[in-house]
Image (cartoon, helix red, strand yellow):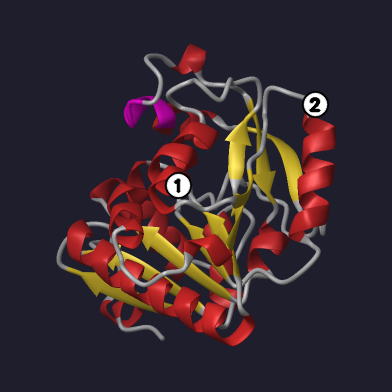
Amino acid sequence: MQIKIYEDKNSLAQTAAAQAATSLCRTIQSRGKARIIAATGVSQFEFLDALTSTPGILWSRVEMFHLDEYIGLAASHPASFRKYLLDRLIKKTGITNYHLLAGDGDVPQTIRSIGRELQAAPVDVAFVGLGENGHIAFNDPPADFQTEDPYLIVELDEPCRRQQVNEGWFADISEVPRQAITMSVRQILKAKEIIAVVPEARKAQAVKTCFEVEISPLAPASILRTHPNTTVFLDKDSAALLKPETRTKT
């Protein structure tokens, strides 16, 4: 794992997008196609804006998988991650080969069918964030580090649900669904490359816990330290609590 720190979230986003674009173009050139996992949330806004504005990516050859989704939320809801990905990635790029998780339908069938597609071939690049409680996707602490299932149905903890309110997706915590579909930790780790985009001061304590304390299900994103080709992109605010030796970690 490599940690890179930038002055602000815009420079972070530009550099992370450049690395992502290089990886996608290289993979498409060598194999004719690329498979990605896309993250959502406020922390990914600038990154996705930069990535979708990058010229030269043959998006028609990209296959996209959905990282997580609320259970019981319609795709038209402003907080739906399906809506997020359609508005901020799919419609902007013209991706035609994508797999969205319908959390308001037959959820077990959804995770079985998309899980089979996901496991049919390796994922080239996974884009992830890091929650204020240290989660990756909706794997809240204590996360399941053992299951090989590609997708799980999980209960969302209160810090996770409160983060969604604070980010403006819901007016009150009572509106935030209690369950979600999430890609499992082990499935995320199967990606050949992981790009973690983690800006803002509100993530600083989670960053410190996940990258300076022991690897543990209580700090789910700490597992990224076991992946040989992960780059964590931080800005000065999210990196503010890190020790100097961690700041230069590769």
Q: Secondary structure at mark 2?
A: loop
**Tag of residue 131:** 1
In this image, 67 relative to 88: left or right? right
Amino acid bearing label 2:
Asp
Q: Position of residue 77 (x, y in %)?
A: 48, 20
Q: Nearer the viewer, residue 113 or 187?
A: 113
48 in relation to 245, above or below = above
Q: Using the image, determine if residue 19 lies above or below residue 136.
A: below
Q: Which mark is residue 85?
A: none
Question: Main structural element of the magenta stretch: helix, strand or loop?
Answer: helix
Query: In the rendered structure, which amino acid carries the disc numbered 1?
Result: Gly
* Residue 166 shown in magenta: yes
Above or below for 18 versus 71 = below
Residue 185 point in image, percent of width and height: 67, 58
The image shows residue 162 at horizontal and vertical percentages of: 43, 27
Q: Can residue 11 be seen at all in this image of the molecule?
A: yes
Given residues 240 and 234, the one toward you in this image is 234
Q: Which residue is mark 2?
A: 106
User: In which image quadrant can residue 228 be found?
Assistant: bottom right
Image quadrant where one finds the C terminus: bottom left
Q: CA distance from mark 2 to mark 1?
A: 27 Å
**Magenta stretch?**
164-168
Of labels 2 and 1, earlier in sequence is: 2
Q: Check disc 1 and report its element: helix, strand or loop.
A: loop
From the viewer's side, name the closer residue of 108 and 207.
108
Whether residue 222 is in magenta: the answer is no
